[in-house]
Image: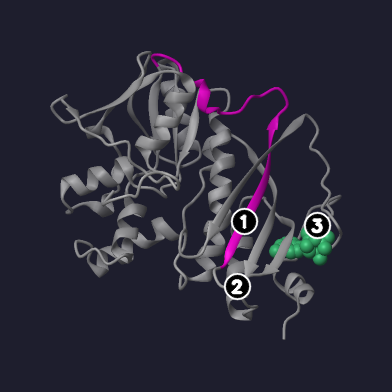
Amino acid sequence: MLGEFDLIRAYFQDQVGPGVLGVGDDAARMPMPPGEQIVVCKDLLIEGRHFFPDVDPETLGHKALAVNLSDLAAMGSKPLGFLLGIGLPEANPQWLAAFSRGMLALGHSAGCPLIGGDTVRVGSEKVISITALGTLPAGQPGLLRQAAKDGDDVWVSGSLGAAHVALLGLQGDERITPERLGSLRPALEIPQPRLALGQALLGIAHAAIDVSDGLVQDLGHVLQASGCGAVLESSRLPIDVRLNGLADELRLKAALSGGDDYELCFTAPLARREDILTLARSVAVPVTRIGRIHSAPGLTVLDDHGQPISIRQSGFDHFGPAQDDV
Ligand code: ADP
Ligand code: MG
């Protein structure tokens, strides 16, 4: 029988840098990097709502940390460390070993050690909450949602739609063949937070957000916070090539309103186009210009002929009306 403290020692004791007090005392302690300020974010994942009960625990460990690192990336912040709160109905060593392996591997590759947390037993559904700490240079505001400016280009990193279509496939949608689902699953289960891109955009981009709830909804947050609007050209959207061969309507809907992409959507002045393409090459992440910010509120998406297409304000909202076939 694995006790709470053996469990923590076996699976959640991470390597930390010099001067850092990690797992084991009443609280963790880290030196503040000189000239930096703290950035902090938290996400909560519940079994059955955010992940399937039988999901591969190694990919779950990866994703639980990745969604937080994506929030740091969207601020332009560099990760410093993270805390893990976890509620489990039982201590299953195989499950814990795989979960910890996936989580700590991403942490190591991102320079973000596990420095503490809390572990409790729960009745049935697993609960995972990670708090990630990062830094920004002192005086640097970060890539804020409120910072989009009239005339900015709208950009997005990577490709869109694959994670959502993978989810449809896992939910039994017959349009998604097993072969296609196999190629799409990594997009849903092993998202790669765009940390290097976010940090490289500091001082160049104006606003940024990570696309976790769908492009339309997440860009909508930027527009609302910035008090402006935007026009997107659907023909410019970097729809994931793994969706080739599916109906255009499904591909477009996945790219515009599908969640879980964890790409960065950002705005920047036209004068920085070349700089952005250069920095994107230097961090090896493709970026695509998809539209323009304007002063009048509202988001318009144009079809191939320049005609507005009807978009519902879709994307995931935990407290919104029940979702249909988004
Ligand atoms: P406390 O009683 O002060 O809450 P705990 O006994 O819960 O302390 O935790 C002991 C140590 O183990 C602390 O340093 C805590 O940060 C760490 N810890 C507990 N659970 C986790 C976890 N899931 N991941 C990482 N560290 C953990
Ligand atoms: Mg505790």
Circle 3 SS class: loop
Q: Is residue 109 magenta?
A: no
Which residue has dot 1 on it?
129
**Which label number is shown at residue 187?**
none
Position of residue 2 in the picture relative to residue 28 (left or right): left
Task: Kindly identify the amino acid type of the residue bearing the numbered disc 3.
Answer: Gly
Label 2 or label 1, whichever comes before in sequence order: 2
Is mark 2 in CB contact (under 8 Å) with mark 3?
no
Residue at left 18%, top 31%?
303
**Which label number is shown at residue 22?**
3
Task: Kindly identify the amino acid type of the residue bearing the numbered disc 1.
Answer: Ser
Residue at left 34%, top 59%?
167
Q: Is residue 15 above or below residue 232?
A: below
In this rendering, does residue 23 appear at all?
Answer: no
**Which label number is shown at residue 123?**
2
Taking depth in this image into account, of 123 and 311 the one nearest to the observer is 123
Q: Using the rendered view, name the quadrant where residue 287 is placed.
A: top left
Where's residue 90, x and y in %? 63, 78
Q: Is residue 136 magenta?
A: yes
